[in-house]
């Protein structure tokens, strides 16, 4: 069972992670991840999907996340010039302790993205994200993140 302080820390972590991503503060966002990180966005609505056998929008480890961020920071990622503006809302946050002692924080999200490139289109995504968090050096870090419909 989580204490009130642990619950609050997990909720604050989710808000911080969303803010850093929305503000394109990618180096700080990357610092929230553990070395064995896995970020998965399946391309299916199958809740039992397996990333080894199902198509994914994103299935990145820590090294791939670092590469994506380096590419964004070069200024030569033309699909993001100028960068899209993003804002996300997080709600229905539920936090619990997993059997292995990690913290599992689940939440619903709505993500609005304004693609400022050619057509200046607004895109909307909604879904549910599961964060697996663990203490590393006295701080919460993400070791797993899965977002799906």
Image (tube, rainbow, N blue to C red):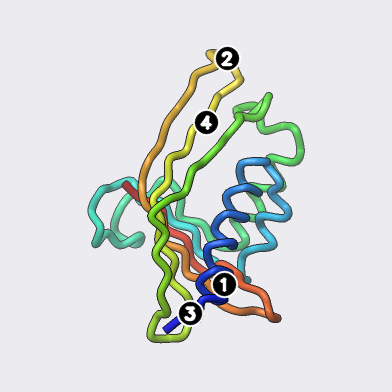
Where 115 sits versus 10, above or below? above
Left-right relation of 98 to 38: left
Q: CA distance from mark 3 to mark 2?
A: 43 Å
Where 92 sits versus 142, above or below? above
Q: Nearer the viewer, residue 13 or 137?
A: 13
- Say which label, 4 or 2, has the lower sequence index: 4
Residue at which label 1 appears: 36
Residue 115, given in percent of the width and then of the height, sits at 55, 24
- Say which label, 1 or 3, has the lower sequence index: 1
Residue 106, given in percent of the width and then of the height, sits at 40, 61
Residue contact between numbered discs 3 and 2, judged by CB atoms under 8 Å: no
Left-right relation of 33 to 127: right
> Which image quadrant for residue 28?
bottom right
Left-right relation of 136 to 91: right
Residue at which label 2 appears: 118
Name the residue: 45% across, 27% down. 123
Left-right relation of 114 to 59: right
> Which image quadrant for residue 77?
top right
């Amino acid at each position: 069972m989580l204490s009130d302080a642990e619950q609050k820390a997990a909720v604050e972590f989710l808000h911080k992670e969303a803010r850093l991503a929305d503000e394109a503060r990618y180096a700080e966002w990357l610092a929230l991840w553990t070395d064995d990180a896995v970020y998965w966005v399946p391309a299916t609505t199958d809740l039992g999907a397996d990333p080894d056998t199902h198509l994914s929008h994103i299935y990145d480890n820590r090294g791939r996340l670092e590469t994506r961020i380096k590419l964004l920071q070069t200024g030569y990622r033309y699909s993001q010039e100028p960068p899209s503006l993003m804002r996300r809302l997080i709600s229905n946050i539920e936090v619990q302790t997993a059997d292995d002692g990690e913290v599992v924080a689940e939440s619903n999200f709505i993500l609005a993205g304004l693609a400022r490139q050619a057509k200046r289109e607004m895109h909307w995504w909604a879904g549910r994200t599961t964060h697996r968090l663990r203490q590393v050096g006295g701080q919460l870090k993400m070791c797993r993140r899965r977002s799906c419909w």
